[in-house]
């Protein structure tokens, strides 16, 4: 299994960053995302993301507001991303100064590309999502 991890600080309070990143249905069409839909709510919800002529189907596996962490997995074998057996956890922490640390960690088996390339793709996704939260929150 390969592991990818991005750790970044967002200059916004924990509650605001949590509200932004933990919204499993909050993705918007734009950039590499060509389409987006979801079914259900809370743990067990499934979102389908159209990108690169394919799709990525993700399921919310765990979510704890108290722990400020959530875990999701890719559940379609024909994912547009180069991962098999993919699972990721996003953990937030309060730095005590109105900033929040975001630790986004994924584990997977590279599919169709060298491990370093798959790790780079994952790291790019995580960094992009965190940058989007930073921009939205002014931090």
Image (cartoon, rainbow, N blue to C red):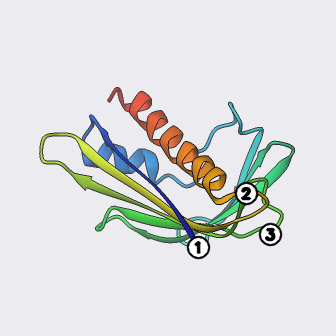
Badge 2 is on which residue? 82
In percent of the image, x 44 and y 65: which residue is there?
A: 70
Q: Nearer the viewer, residue 79 or 26?
A: 79
Label annotation for residue 77: 3
Classify residue 27 as left or right of residue 66. right
In percent of the image, x 83 and y 63: which residue is there?
A: 78
Label annotation for residue 21: none
Q: Secondary structure at mark 3?
A: loop
Mark pair 1, 3: CA separation? 16 Å
Q: Nearer the viewer, residue 26 or 73?
A: 73
Mark pair 2, 3: CA separation? 10 Å
Question: Is residue 135 positioned above or below 23 on the image?
Answer: above
Mark pair 2, 1: CA separation? 13 Å
Pinpoint residue 7: horizontal percent, then vertical percent. Answer: 36, 49
Around disc 2, counting alpha carbons within 10 Å, would you say few (fewer than 14), some (14 to 19), or many (20 or more)?
A: many
Badge 1 is on which residue? 1
Pinpoint residue 104: horizontal percent, then vertical percent. Answer: 44, 56
State which tag comes first along the sequence, 1 or 3.
1
């Amino acid at each position: 299994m390969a592991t990818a991890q991005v750790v970044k600080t967002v200059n916004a309070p924990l509650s605001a960053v949590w509200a932004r990143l933990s919204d499993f249905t909050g993705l918007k069409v734009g950039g590499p995302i060509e389409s987006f839909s979801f079914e259900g709510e809370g743990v067990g919800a499934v979102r389908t993301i159209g990108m690169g002529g394919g799709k990525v189907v993700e399921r919310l596996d765990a979510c704890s507001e108290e722990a400020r962490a959530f875990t999701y997995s890719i559940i379609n074998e024909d994912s547009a991303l180069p991962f098999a057996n993919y699972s990721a956890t996003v953990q937030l922490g309060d730095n005590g100064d109105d900033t929040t640390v975001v630790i986004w960690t994924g584990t997977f088996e590279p599919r169709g590309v060298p491990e370093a390339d798959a790790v780079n793709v994952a790291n790019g996704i995580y960094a992009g999502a965190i940058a989007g939260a930073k921009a939205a929150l002014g931090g």
